[in-house]
Image (cartoon, grey):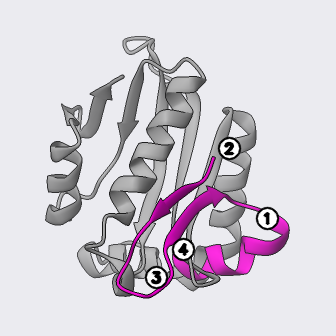
Amino acid sequence: MLCIVTGASDSPATIRPYDAAHDREALGACVIEQQDFHRSLESAWPEGRTILDRYVKYLEDQSAAHDGRILVAEQAGAIVGFISVASSTQGESPDDPATYAWIHDVFVKATHRRRGLARRLMAEAESFARARGARQLRLGVLSSNASARAMYRELGFREYVNVLSKGL
């Protein structure tokens, strides 16, 4: 799986699977920036550095446990964004027995936004989940993150118990 996305720089961005041996530090930098952005929207969220190691391990563990994948967006040798998708997840509540794919995170560094990278990451995650038999894709988004909520709606998601959902 390899996607080419053109950006403002001379080199195109590629979307590829995360390689823990080579990408962990760069993914960590993205996680810190992402969490700190979320903290700017919701002050109760922890600073990115305080959860970095545990959160990267969480994403890796979720991918392993739920037939998932972390994908990174790379441009000019630098990771500028990522998405984490689990293709087979089920809620704990017996009143929602559906199995679904879950987007844990989608993030693009502020310096690389508005170039279509988040949409490409979402498309690759959707394709990955669909290829593994998922029939629905869900994600959570902070209510105060208006630009992300707008993008998700444009991509076909709808409100669902304070979680956005999209049939696949």
Q: Which residue is mark 2?
A: 63
Cβ atoms at labels 4 and 3 below 8 Å apart: yes
Q: Earlier in the sequence, mark 3 or mark 2?
A: 3
- Tell me which corner region of the image, top left, top right, bottom left or bottom right, holds residue 150: bottom left
Q: Earlier in the sequence, mark 2 or mark 4?
A: 4
Up-down: is 34 above or below 124? Answer: below
Label 3 vs label 2: CA separation?
Answer: 21 Å
Label 3 vs label 1: CA separation?
Answer: 19 Å
Q: Is disc 1 surrounded by few (<14), some (14 to 19) or many (20+) residues within 10 Å?
A: few
Up-down: is 106 above or below 87? Answer: below
Q: Quadrant of the C terminus?
A: top left
Residue under the image location 63 percent in, 73 percent down? 27
Cβ atoms at labels 3 and 2 below 8 Å apart: no
Residue at far right of view: 21
Q: Position of residue 126 (x, y in %)?
A: 45, 37
Left or right relative to 44: residue 87: right
- Would residue 3 be counted in the magenta stretch? yes
Residue at far front of view: 10
The stretch of residues the image draws in magenta is 1-30
Residue 31, numbered label: 4
Label 4 vs label 3: CA separation?
Answer: 5 Å
Cβ atoms at labels 3 and 1 below 8 Å apart: no
Q: Secondary structure at mark 1?
A: helix
Q: Amino acid at mark 2?
A: Ser
Q: Amino acid at mark 3?
A: Glu
Residue 33, numbered label: 3
The answer to which of 87 and 120 lies nearer the viewer is 120
Q: Amino acid at mark 4?
A: Val
Residue 20, numbered label: 1
Residue under the image location 34 percent in, 47 percent down? 140
